[in-house]
Image: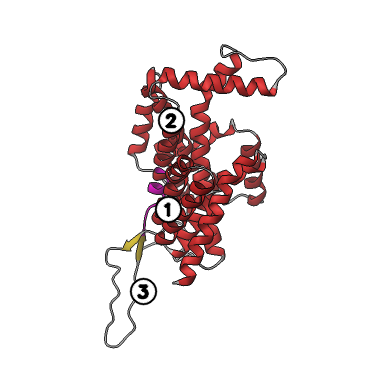
Amino acid sequence: MMTFGLIALIAGAASALMFASIVSGALISLVLVCLAPLPLMLAGIAWGPLCGAIGGFVAMLVIGSVLSVPLAVGYGLAIALPAWWLGHLAMLGRPSAGGTAVAHEGAPAAPLQVEWYPLGRILLWIAALATLVTAGSLLSLGTDATTIGEAMRRGFARVLSLMGEAAVTESDPRVSVMVAVTPVLVAAAQMATLSLNLWLAAKAAAVSGKLHRPWPDLSSTSLPPMTLVALCVALAFSFSSGIGGILAVVVTTVLMMAYALIGLAVLHIITRDLNNRAFWLAAAYAIIFMFSVSLVLLTALGLADAVFGFRERFLRNRQPPPLPTS
């Protein structure tokens, strides 16, 4: 019990320090803030959701006492709560149908078969949490589209004025572009950071021997069919005005990011038979990292797989022909 509490304390303190590093103004602090959920996710995956919850509460106490209570509340809603919930879902399982352990005539019982929470649903939860965090950050600026836009215009004009020699007005075209793309960039960043943190936490738990489940086949991840319908509805509403249109843009962005991750899974499947597969995958990841516009191609690949089932067809063609029965 003492070890359990110590781990929760260390995870919470580490996450709080990573989050509080933003006050330093150093560029590396942006990376640390993005990785702030990692210690809590690792604690939740390796030592259980209670450990992650205690760590998040400790981090909130540290931030509230050192910085401010509103920042602690924001940290709890935007970082601690998603980290705890995703860590819980990653280790959520139930006995599969017909998988109960049974012993016969003194023989050892068969191992219990566990059905783990589907990866596609975890990806949907990541999209939902990214939507809520992004919507919360935008609504903290105002409750209507006009107020939110004006607040962002004032902020971006001030930032551009500090970066340049001449004063920048709110009507500057650069400010308008930044206001237009901010909801998309924030939503995409939230989706990417939550997904990356969960993968890093699970990988660290597996390397340390603390992942109490088999490593999942990430390339088989698929979203529920109704996700495509939700994407089409959100895309249609994103052309409307007002706060509804902004929220629809956020939902469209996170769902497209989810399909981009599915596109990565398709890429891993269809390159299995290639020579120098590691080189081609490394090149693909380098292109994605350097040219973010390539995410559009990944999203198209993920959407095409959802419609045409590329992975199923590829895996079906790789299976050997059935043996003759006569």
Identify the residue position indicated by label 1 in the image. Answer: 84
Q: Residues within 10 Å of mark 1 (few under 14, many from 20)?
A: many
Mark earlier in primary sequence (1, 2): 1
Numbered label attached to residue 140: 2
* C-alpha distance separating marks 1 and 3: 29 Å
Numbered label attached to residue 111: 3
Mark earlier in primary sequence (1, 3): 1
Determine which quarter of the picture holds residue 92: bottom left
- Determine the main secondary structure of the stretch shown in magenta: helix
Q: Residue at x 47, y 55 (%)?
A: 58
| Helix, strand or loop status at disc 2 | loop
Question: Closer to us: mark 1 or mark 3?
Answer: 1
Determine which quarter of the picture holds residue 100: bottom left
Q: Amino acid at mark 2?
A: Ser
Q: What residue span does the magenta drawing correspond to?
A: 116-124
Q: Position of residue 289 (x, y in %)?
A: 63, 39
